Image (tube, rainbow, N blue to C red):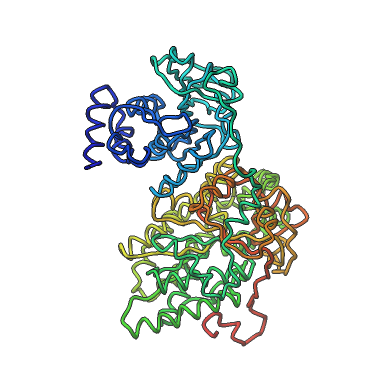
Amino acid sequence: MDMARLRDRMVEYHLMRRGIRDRSVTRAMRTVPREKFVAPGFEEFAYEDAPLAIGEGQTISQPYIVALMLEKANLDAGDKVLEVGTGSGYASALISRIARHVYSIERHERLALQARERFEQLGYRNIDVRIGDGSKGWAKTAPFDAIIVSAGAPEVPAALKEQLDLGGRLIIPVGQDDQQRLKRITRTGAATFEEEDLGGVFFVPLIGEDAWTAAHPMYTPAVPPSHPEETPDAIIAAAAEEFSSINDKSFAALFDRFAESRIVLLGESTHGTSEFYEARAAISRHLVEHHGFNMIAVEADWPDAAMIDRWINGKAPTGGPAFSRFPGWMWRNREFSQFVGWMHDENDRRRALQKDAIRFYGLDLYNMAGSIRSVLDYLEDVSPETARVAKERYGCLSPWQSHPATYGRAVLTDAYRSCEEAVLKQCTELLARSLDDTISDGDDFLNAAQSARLLAAAERYYRVMYYGGSQAWNLRDTYMADTVEHLLDFHGRAAKIIIWAHNSHIGDARYTEMAAARDELNLGQLCRQRFDAMTSLIGLGTHSGEVIAADDWDGEAEKKRIRPSLPQSCERLCHDTGKPRFLLDLKGNEELHANLVEQRLQRFIGVIYRPETERLSHYMSTSLSRQYDAFLWFDETRALSPLLPQEGATTDQETFPFGL
């Protein structure tokens, strides 16, 4: 049987001729194979406009009624939708082709498990299914833009109304079996709702604490799941893909699942942990050698990275020493130097084979560290007190900071405001000099183009950076995303890029306090939005150990002890598994994804670590499974091995990385 032709006929005859006009609904109905959701042997009836039995006294609703409910729900591509009554999973599948994410509840365990299996086979990964009482909704993942109930209730359950977002729509059959009316409830305020009658329908009963119970003739007691509900740490333990060490070949092979991505972002929860650098190096080598990735881009200044790029491509570096400003240890360390050496050797091999070279780029085009140093130097000359305030403020320029007092105190200082124009001039001149060094040989069009873009926006950037806050962060990450896009365009359709940056840059900001509390976006979010199916976000985390960090901006690099993660954090869940090293596939494992959707604390340590104020300074609430596609875990970690220049030294450390 030609199922595609039968689907088109169903849409034409049973839906559109009866008034269904929503193109997103008809497109989904043409796409989702209904024959996969009916009982074996009933495939030939899949596209008749009739309900079909699926067991447990339940049915798959007739296509027209499903389409009507979806159309009346006014679904949008960005919506989060709750479906009550998963049944076969057909309606959930349709919703998933229209909306951003679907949460579906089913009372019968067998049906829920069958539906999950169908979604897995079809590759529908934006659906979470749980077994439970649908009349109570799914409070942990609320509020919802729409709720669609595929069973009839005696009246509208209060819990479902409360879980609607403002403007949210609830579609539900209400009334006795032969007198059911399809209702649309729209939330218009905190305690106000608008109700519409959409006509008569007939659905199986909604059984639950806030719906039909023992009084209903079709009521049968809910069968509890065959196994008790597992705790999140137990679910993590079951899903964890362990490895013995970073050096084991099996470790890098874990990341073959991301081979089809065009952009792979590798994070870190600190800027000073050895395992994070070693792991990113091993993953990058594997993706370059086996899956065609040909660019590495890092959270570093463009001019400094350009020196590395020249060296690994057999050219003499220009300008001063690379990565010589605070925080020098981020890139002047033994772990990164070894990776640079590998890129150099790999490019030598590629030149011999006449293959395209690996390129290395910095995404921070603004020379941020040097510019901040310029600000502080100037302020220390004209107003030491203002410089002290500025240094404290720059130490808090992180999206996870929960204490805004330093921002307010800095911008209210008259001396600070009076220095603005002079500092902007200094920063712009510094930028122009460093970019001139980068393109001094005149033969690198990409460097010249990036320099022109930056100089055109420099004054705005430095003015925003001078006062700090979310605007500075947003401008910086937007330019990082623009740079990624320019690099991919410049190198052509075959280009594939690996990005090294902090978790706060590579995790999707929409699912963190960054967006909710400070209206911030980030690189990972923008890559997902611009390159939806081609982006993979991989976070890295740790429970305890040692880290290289400073007390304040421009402070000395110190080896510090990381405090054990807080009990309410996702790090503590990983630690409680008792497993030292593992990968969590948050996108591919639906049960794991659903159990880690809930907002929990997550730790972020940048170039500054202040253990004495750790909760305020280094934690924010996030949804781990929505923020990342995967999460790489090291329970106990070591500090980086810095290669900082020493006064009067003439060793290889002075010529990093070129002398190593």
Give the quadrant of residue 489.
bottom left
Give the quadrant of residue 190.
top right
Q: Nearer the viewer, residue 582 or 301?
A: 582
Quadrant assignment for the N terminus: top left
Residue 400: percent from the left, percent from the top? 63, 50
User: Residue at the top extreme?
Assistant: 179
Kindly tell me whether residue 471 is visible in this rendering.
no
Give the quadrant of residue 267.
bottom right
User: Residue at the front extreme?
Assistant: 41
Q: Nearer the viewer, residue 449 or 41?
A: 41
Q: Is residue 565 left or right of residue 107?
A: right
Q: Nearer the viewer, residue 88 or 342?
A: 88
On screen, 637 above or below 538? below
Residue 458: percent from the left, percent from the top? 47, 55
Residue 374: percent from the left, percent from the top? 59, 62
On screen, 484 above or below 408? below
Kindly tell me whether residue 640 is visible in this rendering.
yes
Residue for point 40% across, 39% down: 93
User: Residue at the bottom extreme?
Assistant: 650
Q: How many marks?
A: 0
Residue for point 43% across, 15% down: 181
Q: Is residue 204 left or right of residue 394?
A: left
Quadrant assignment for the C terminus: bottom right
Residue 258: percent from the left, percent from the top? 44, 61
User: Residue at the right extreme?
Assistant: 612
